[in-house]
Amino acid sequence: MAIDVRIPTILRTYTGGEKVVSGEGSTLAALIDNLESNHPGIKERLIDGSELRRFVNVYVNDEDVRFTGSLETKLDDGDEVVVLPAVAGGSAAMVQVARG
Amino acid sequence: MLKIDRATYDAIVTHAKKDHPDEACGIVAGPEGSDTPTRFVPMVNAAGSPTFYEFDSQELLALYKEMDKSDEEPVVIYHSHTATEAYPSRTDIRLASEPNAHYVLVSTREHGNSEGPVEFRSFRIVDGEVTEEEVSVVES
């Protein structure tokens, strides 16, 4: 079972510069564990504790996984996964942002 | 140095003034590797806030797919500060995730929605390190 994962520029240091890598897993959590075994270090950039990081967006077949079960989102052979860091910022301190 | 044409520069300033007192945000895409901002793309600030901005998640995906298709990249990522200086905040620095982009900050704190000059500055933000750079406006 192969799933294509699009890697954003900032995480390509973990994939030897590759834009798209192949992974396996029946859920997003399993896929990320599989990616970690081939690209050590990448998991920590995607997951904080047991949750997807607040400012990392992951899409499965164009749907934001926050609306489809987050890390428990089911995956099938041929699915397309896209990882994009949020484009965000602003004059507020991070504490306020996290609460807001 | 950021080289940007007058029309794009003006479009960014106009957007910042229009959305004041909320922060305005967007990008200017350009051909991959060209370091030339050519396609102005104003974005909706999904946070709708005077102190925070975030691209809407679906619009972000659509934008990146479109850029991929046309071999473009985000050459400029801009946003406004509406009550503080045009300098990256700690939040801006922590969330900066395009090491190749010019981060443009516009401050509308002085004139708000009205006519008048704004602060317009450009920075590189790489691994938490901020480097200011010169802005050169090319008259079109």
Image (spheres, rainbow, N blue to C red):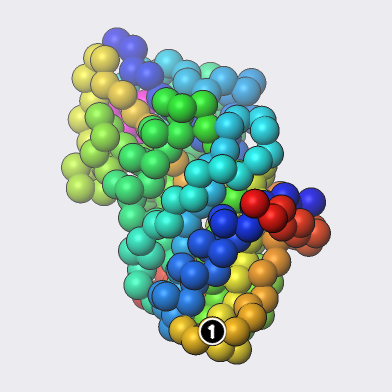
Quadrant of residue B122 in the image?
bottom right
* Most foreground residue, B87 or B114: B114
Q: Secondary structure at mark 1?
A: loop
Residue name at image x 46 percent, y 68 percent: B15
Prevailing secondary structure of the magenta residues: helix
Rendering coords of residue B112 (x, y %): 51, 86
Residue furthest out toward the top: A1
Residue name at image x 56 percent, y 88 percent: B111
Residue B126 falls within the magenta-colored stretch: no
Residue A28 falls within the magenta-colored stretch: yes
Instruction: Classify B78 as above or below A30.
Output: below
Q: Chain of mark 1?
A: B
Q: Which residues are magenta?
A: A27-31
* Most foreground residue, B135 or B23: B135
Residue name at image x 56 percent, y 55 percent: B8
Residue name at image x 53 percent, y 48 percent: B28
Does residue B93 appear left or right of residue B39 in this picture?
right
Residue furthest out toward the front: B140
Rendering coords of residue A60 (x, y %): 27, 32
Does residue A65 appear left or right of residue A93 in this picture?
left
Q: Mark 1 = which residue? A: B115
Rendering coords of residue A65 (x, y %): 27, 42
Instruction: Classify A20 as above or below B87.
Output: above
Query: Which amino acid type corresponds to the residue marked 1 in the rendered image?
Result: Glu
Does residue B105 appear left or right of residue A74 in this picture?
right
Q: Quick check: can you spot residue A74?
A: yes
Q: Quick check: can you spot residue A90?
A: no
Rendering coords of residue B87 (x, y %): 68, 72
